[in-house]
Image: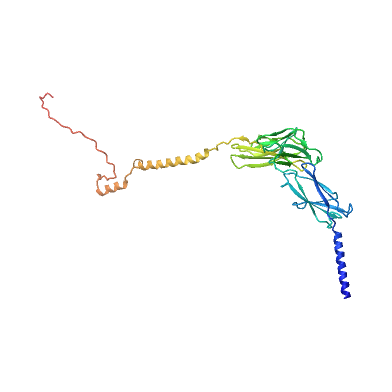
Amino acid sequence: MTSTRELYAFLTFTAMMMVYHCKADFPPPPTGLTFKWLDPFAVNVSWQDPSGLQNGEVMYKIHLKGVEDDVKCRTDKHFKDSYLTEQIGSDHWTYQVWTVVGNCTSTNESKKVDITINSPKTQVKLKDTKCIIYTEGMNCSWNSTHQPFNFSYRTCPEETLKPLRVCDRPYSSAERSGCYLKDYKFKERKFDVCIHVETEAGWSTFKPRFVIHPPKLIIKEGKDDLRLEWEHQSIGVCEWNFTVCYTRCKKPEVCRSGGPSVLIAYDKDCLYEFRSRTETIGHYCHKVTSDFSDVVKYGSNKPPDQTLMVVAIVVPIILSVCIILSCYCFRKHSSILFPIIPDPSAIFKEMMINGNKDHKTTGNLYTPVPEPIESCKVTVVAENSDL
């Protein structure tokens, strides 16, 4: 009985020590999670240290729900992130924050605490947002929504804490709405422009695509080829790749890409129709593209040479007709062209049988037609007559 009690007491003590040890291994989670919008693009999330732990003993992990393999680890009790309506499908999203003791690879972690970020206003998405680059600035626009709007922008991500710049040259038409950014100089490296557009329906934040006007196509004709060259707007030291698509003699379209010039075979009997575009290449430049240019025509469609085909068809027909007519004439006039000649052996044989020189004419001999002879009448005249 005593041994049983001792065993029971030992097991109870062991279980209590394990529970205490487990509780001691898992740190408490962070508390007091809050968020604050710094501007329409950036939000700051902060929290407080968990109770019972000294500063420097713990680190924090942050994860955006719905995004795999996106866990950030830091010692600060806050983090800042940027959002664009073109990247987020809803007006709210949830972060998870938890405590980890030791370094970021430690498995001694607390439970996860959620915080949901709500967009300040309803999010709307604008279609076909782009900024056309000029030497003196940019023209940023989108497909017109026929609604009044407020346009502001900033360089991102470096100007997060600076006030947004307000557009002073907005415009709106039936096709597109936008703003001329005269004071914004395009920088080929590192910086983007973040645009905020607010309408009655809500707001939209986005990074537009950068475009330039389509390059001017120059066509130089060689002996058996065409050399295509382009004049385009130069942006810094960026390298460019050109794409040309063309049709000839109404055949399917063919596209070619290359550097400052492209060489293609030339058929002088065909009409060529070209359209071209360009884009930057390389990781050190922003992605800048152009739309396809208007169609440029070169040459003309000429009818193919039909001489050989005509000769190959007409000459046999003429020869056939001549042969048919010749056969018809020979057949109709064969008795004149080819008369029947009597056999001389038959004549000699007849003479030998009859024994005289007068031989009977055969049906095969030629019989002359007798000449007509007029009959004469003789009248006796007396000597003493008047005659």
Q: Nearer the viewer, residue 106 or 251?
A: 106
What percent of the width, then of the height, locates residue 7?
A: 87, 72
Q: Residue at x 86, y 64 (%)?
A: 18
Q: Is residue 214 visible?
A: no
Image mark count: 0
**In the displayed structure, would residue 297 be above or below residue 66?**
above
Q: Is residue 370 left or right of residue 164?
A: left
Quarter holding residue 193:
top right
Q: Nearer the viewer, residue 325 or 272?
A: 272
**In the displayed structure, would residue 8 be above or below residue 210?**
below
> What quarter of the picture does the C terminus occupy?
top left
Q: Which residue occupies the extreme top position in the image?
A: 386
What percent of the width, then of the height, locates residue 56?
A: 89, 52
Q: Is residue 225 left or right of residue 158?
A: left
What percent of the width, then of the height, locates residue 276?
A: 67, 38
Quarter holding residue 382:
top left
Q: Is residue 247 left or right of residue 73?
A: left
What percent of the width, then of the height, locates residue 143?
A: 67, 38
Q: Nearer the viewer, residue 111 or 378?
A: 111
Q: Residue at x 88, y 74 (%)?
A: 3
Q: Nearer the viewer, residue 143 or 228?
A: 143
Figure colour scheme? rainbow
